[in-house]
Amino acid sequence: MKTGARVLGVDDAGHSLDDATTEIIGVVYRGTEFIEDVRFGEVDVDGDNATQSIIQLHERCNNTKQIAAVIVDGI
């Protein structure tokens, strides 16, 4: 991946297993220097819509076509 490539990092917000849904947060950053965009979405807790929720979040980001990778944690 070239230096300064755009990456979308996604993580879920704090929640309990009793919650039906929780927020996901996506941050687009370029290299290690620039945060370019922050977006929020929603995902079912222990559901099977995580991939679709991340795709929808990705599609709402600025510079969508220039995002080289998606990194997830905990979702």
Image (tube, rainbow, N blue to C red):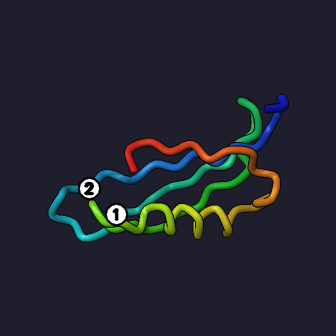
**Left or right, residue 1 beside residue 11:** right
Q: Is residue 37 above or below residue 40?
A: above
Q: Position of residue 5 (x, y in %)?
A: 80, 38
Instruction: Give the quarter of the image for residue 58.
Output: bottom right
Q: Position of residue 27 (x, y in %)?
A: 61, 49
Q: CA distance from mark 1 to mark 2?
A: 6 Å
Q: Position of residue 16 (x, y in %)?
A: 20, 56
Q: Position of residue 68 (x, y in %)?
A: 75, 45
**Left or right, residue 11 beside residue 61:** left
Instruction: Give the quarter of the image for residue 57.
Output: bottom right
Q: Do residues under tags 1 and 2 come within 8 Å of each other at their CB atoms?
A: yes
The numbered disc on residue 22 is 1
**Left or right, residue 46 beside residue 57:** left
- Choose between 2 and 28: the one closer to the eye: 2
- Choose between 27 and 53: the one closer to the eye: 53
Q: Amino acid at mark 2?
A: His
Q: Amino acid at mark 1?
A: Thr
Outermost residue toward the left in this view: 18
Q: Which residue is mark 2?
A: 15
Q: Is residue 1 above or below residue 27?
A: above
The residue carrying pointer 1 sits among few (fewer than 14), some (14 to 19) or many (20 or more) residues within 10 Å by Cα, namely: some
